[in-house]
Amino acid sequence: ARSAAVANATQSCVSRDGVRIEAFANLGSLADAEIAMAHGAEGSGLLRTEFLFLDRDAAPDVQEQATLYGQIAAKLDGRPLIIRLLDIGGDKPASYLPMAAEENPALGLRGIRVSLARPDILDQQLRAILSVVPYGQCRIMVPMVASVDELLAVRQRVDILCREMAIGHRIEVGVMVETPAAAVTAAMLARHADFLSIGTNDLTQYALAMDRGNPAVAAGVDGLHPAVLGLIALTAAGARGHKRWVGVCGGLASDRLAIPLLLGLGVTELSAAPHFVPDLKALVRRLSIAECRLHAEAALQLESPAQVRALARRFEEGLS
Ligand code: PEP
Ligand code: MG
């Protein structure tokens, strides 16, 4: 299986009708970057930076962060690396962050809200990312955005730090769409963002008001629920209006039934689990995006996740 995966690693990711799709991998460590490269990832659409911040007494300083981001970027050998700003919250506490116990941590101080409440931590992370050369390989992604103002605040800090650090290159700042608010206002966000990337794990949790980690509702937490598909369609339309690309970095990007629907809705970048990248590329090569569009239009008419999954299975069976 390993040699098949490696053979696949060098293959391209272009649909049958000639549409280029970026096959990226999600990373949570330096080791992941190695695995992703061995499996032919064309970059990373999500580096989860929390691993650097958890289980310790103080936040990592600029130097420590810069070294690690630089090592991961080097492993990717010039390919894009999308670094997500710290996405920590009441459910993943860090002793050095003043976070009170919350009754609803998923609705509390987490993601970009923590970074904006702690400008020192935000600036240290931005400085570390901005110090990675070559400039432009690393892009910045903002988690848990619910308002345009949050994006603008980060963009402003990036611009100020770039001036301070004498960086002439424009560093891209994108938004993770994982709240219904972000999906509904995607067109406004896309006006100011360089890209949008849909975090379908949280988007599903918040759209359905179902805790993604609660086994009692696990069966209902399905990213192919019509409500989630509708929010993805809104996000893609919002991005398209401002000629921004839209990707998916949540679990749906590693779901073979979901991928044709996502591409049919206008997604052009998928960031999947590293081991899934060869399968992802092989699937894209069998797809016609024109057919995926019709498929997605049909799916948007359905009334339950079960109906969407049944349609998606028929679509998959019909692939040559
Ligand atoms: C998501 O919410 O879909 C996502 C990719 O982020 P995480 O799983 O780290 O919350
Ligand atoms: Mg998330």
Image (cartoon, rainbow, N blue to C red):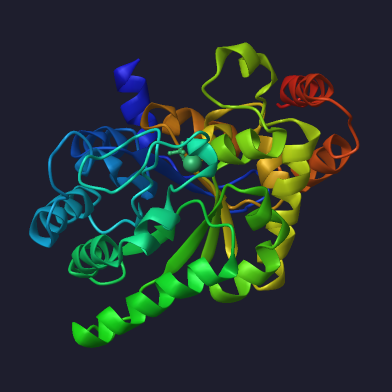
Please state if 182 lies on the left or on the right of 145 as rendered: right
- Give residue 286's quadrant in the image: top right
Quadrant (top left, top right, bottom left, bottom right) of the C terminus: top right
Confirm whether residue 62 shows in the render. yes
Quadrant (top left, top right, bottom left, bottom right) of the N terminus: top left
Instruction: Establish if 39 lies above or below 126.
Output: above
Confirm whether residue 193 shows in the render. no
Please state if 309 lies on the left or on the right of 159 as rendered: right
Instruction: Establish if 192 lies above or below 53.
Output: below
Identified at 42% across, 32% down, the residue is 273
Q: Nearer the viewer, residue 317 or 203?
A: 203
Please state if 154 lies on the left or on the right of 306 as rendered: left
Identified at 61% across, 17% down, the residue is 218
Identified at 48% across, 63% down, the residue is 174
Residue 121 percent across, percent down from the top left:
25, 60
Residue 14 percent across, percent down from the top left:
55, 47
Marks counted in the figure total: 0
Residue 291 percent across, percent down from the top left:
79, 42
Please state if 194 lies on the left or on the right of 304 as rendered: left
Identified at 53% across, 57% down, the residue is 145
Q: Residue furthest top?
A: 216
Instruction: Establish if 256 lies above or below 291.
Output: above
Residue 248 percent across, percent down from the top left:
55, 45
- Give residue 81's quadrant in the image: bottom left
